[in-house]
Amino acid sequence: MKYLSYVLFIFLSVMALRAMTPEARRSYEAFERKAESGDPEAMYRLSALLERGFDTIPADTARSVSLLKRSARAGYAPAMNYLGFLYQTGFPANSGRFLAENRDSALIWMRGAADLGDAKAAHNLAYLILSASDGNNSCSAAQDSLAADYLGRAADAGLPQSMTLLADLYARGRAVPCDTARAVALYEKAISRGFPDAETRLVNMMALRWSRYASSVSLSEALRYWNLGAYAAAVSLLRQIGPSEPQTARAYALLGHAASRGLGMPYDHRLANEYFARAAILGNPSAQFILAETLEIFPDALEGLFPELPDSLTPSALRASAARAGITSAEAAVAALLLPVSAGATI
């Protein structure tokens, strides 16, 4: 296996040249012999190469499909999964297909790969089952339960897509008991692995519940989500904090920070200035420092935002106020904004 990976690496590295060199040709021929000798992984990788062609190697759909089938029949799980996928969609997706759509064949190959421990196959199998099930009869319920089992395997293997789809089931109580806390935990785990779809679904599920949070809880949760990288969730929570709450100053400052970076909301320099100004007026030192720097560069940054600007919104006054709270740099201002909420620290 290590030899195959090395040969393939050398081949693809050299193939990056505009034309195939003698060295690349020898590497390719060695790789091809490995596949034709019956090595399942080599057959699968050569099939992938021939599916589209590469450099001077032309596409060869017939041979690609033949190699893929041989690899799958030899029990190579990635090939089994991909063959199942092609049976699901048909291949190629035009007239004269080499593989006609066949859901039963797709299920057989994907399940075989999943049972061999292929996490992607487990996810694909679950998705295929769920997309075809209406959940209205005992047969559908049994299929949904099977899908949930395979999703659990894929989620345990670390696939964020599977965590998200499994969270959807827990949120709706489909095939598993309704469990919002479990759904949230799965969405958050998927978010931490860089899957943005999970955050969208989390916000959709939790927005109404978040609207009932006390302001202190909203701020604390917003900061937790911000530090998780779930900026849309953080912004949604910050917007729940009313204008007369003790946490409002920091909420406005964080919303200004979000608008100034395009995090969780579209980038909007004017809106950011408005949020920072409102936070500064309410006494947030981070907002005061950031706004002071902005006004020193753009003296008219607040023009038209307020009927009359308070004297406290001059660069010198803002810097002095921020300094009294220990904020003397932009880095310190941002760091203070993102500190966890502590008892009595609401600005």
Image (cartoon, rainbow, N blue to C red):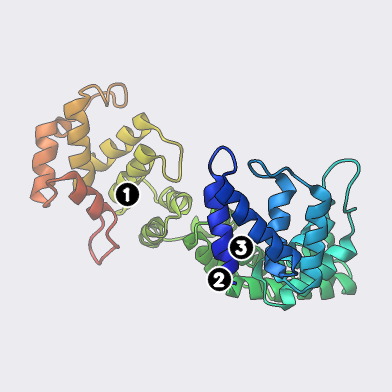
Label 2–label 1 contact, CB within 8 A: no
Label 2 crowd (10 A; few <14 / some 14-19 / many >=20): few
Name the one closer to the observer, 125 or 301. 125
Mark before the other along the chain sequence, 1 or 3: 3
In the image, what residue occupies the spot 83% across and 63% down?
106
Sooner in the amino-acid sequence: mark 2 or mark 3: 2
How far, Cα to Cα, is label 2 from label 1? 59 Å
Secondary structure category for the residue under label 3 = helix
Q: Residue at x 43, y 49 (%)?
A: 235
Image position of 211 with respect to 312: above or below: below
Viewer-nearest residue: 158 or 144: 158
Could you tell me which residue is drawn at 32 percent across and 49 percent down?
248
Amino acid carrying mark 3 in the image = Thr
What residue is pinned by disc 2?
Answer: 2
Query: Which x, y percent locates residue 21?
Result: 57, 44
Outermost residue toward the front? Answer: 22
Dividing the picture into quadrants, the one containing residue 282 is: top left
Instruction: Nearest to the eye among marks 2 and 1: give it.
Output: 2
Q: Is there any visible trace of residue 298 in the rendered image?
A: yes
Residue type at the position of mark 2: Lys
Q: Which residue is mark 3?
A: 164
Q: What is the count of numbered marks?
A: 3
CB within 8 Å, label 2 to label 3: no
| Closer to the camera in the image, 53 or 107 | 53
Report helix, strand or loop for mark 2. helix
Position in image of residue 222 (x %, y %): 40, 57
- Which is more N-terminal, label 1 or label 2? 2
Q: CA distance from mark 2 to mark 3?
A: 34 Å
Which callout, 1 or 3, points to the residue nearer the camera? 3
The kind of secondary structure element at disc 1 is helix
Residue that badge 1 annotates: 248
Under mark 1, the amino acid is Thr
